Amino acid sequence: MPLSRWSSFELACEAIAAGVVEDISGSTVRRWLAADAIKPWQYRSWIAPRAPDFAAKAAVVLDLYARIFDGKPLGPGDYVLCSDEKTSIQARCRCHPTLPPGRARLMRVEHEYDRGGALAYLAAWDVHRGKVFGHCAPSTGIAPFARLVQQVMGTEPYASANRVFWVLDNGSSHRGQAAIDRMTSKWPTARLVHTPVHASWLNQCEIYFSVVQRKVVTPNDFYDLTDVQSRLEAFQDLYNLAARPFNWKYTKKDLHALLARIAAHEPGQISAPAT
């Protein structure tokens, strides 16, 4: 059957045609499936770790979250920041005004819209202090990221810190040794720490961006890019009033267990981190 997902009615028809039962209704099939523990029509997307240095790089990030670096506890003058870029935030100008919710009626957002352009939102999240810094730019790049670094490193307590660790992904704005050299030449106390490839879930700034997506960007209903930028900056100020560190529970022990499960299915593909 050329079906990737089956309806209850289609399953009932197939069961009858295959001789499994003489007769059955779609509602009965639906009721049985709802009560069963196995639900094969549900799925999750995921990316298997494939980078050969995945374990080593992930372990460094998780150690920093636990206030450890090179096997030694971080000092009071050490800070850990996670930085990321939320790209292509569009200003969708609805063709008809959004209708507010009313009695027995959901809020109604017009399906059609005019495109008002897009911008990027760059942010840095202080892992242990629970504070976010950020700004908007027409696009991502080396210069917008440098502006974010200046925004953070030019203020206290980071300006006089012993070390400031920046946990980043491998985006083109801050990838590789060239980015490390640019950072240390401008800010000697700053240290770039790259997550493994395809491991954005290790970056705590992604958690903040998920909050932004739910509370600011959805539903996308803006007049223009100025409206988008004003909303993002106002939310950032509001969020900082009550922000606190995320309750991060994923440790190197969890990482070791994950990689062990993967290795059981794909022997030799990736090794577990050092304990």
Image (tube, rainbow, N blue to C red):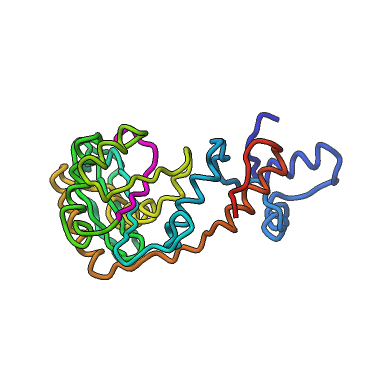
On the question of residue 114 being in view, the answer is no
Q: Is residue 15 above or below residue 101?
A: above
Depth order, front residue of 93/90: 90
Image position of 268 (left or right of 217): right
Residue 201 percent across, percent down from the top left: 46, 49
Depth order, front residue of 69/2: 69
Give the residue drawn at x 24%, y 55%.
99
Instruction: Name which quarter of the figure residue 140 lies in.
Output: top left
Residue 19 percent across, percent down from the top left: 86, 40
**Residue found farthest to the left:** 226
**Residue found farthest to the top:** 2
Residue 93 percent across, percent down from the top left: 20, 42
Residue 38 percent across, percent down from the top left: 71, 53
Q: Which residues are magenta?
A: 163-173
On the question of residue 87 being in view, the answer is yes
Depth order, front residue of 159/116: 159
Image position of 199 (left or right of 76): right
Does residue 106 show up magenta in the picture? no
Does residue 170 show up magenta in the picture? yes
Give the residue drawn at x 28%, y 47%.
220
Instruction: Name which quarter of the figure residue 2 lies in.
Output: top right
Q: Is residue 12 above or below residue 32?
A: above
Q: Is residue 116 above or below residue 71?
A: above
Give the residue drawn at x 46%, y 54%.
70
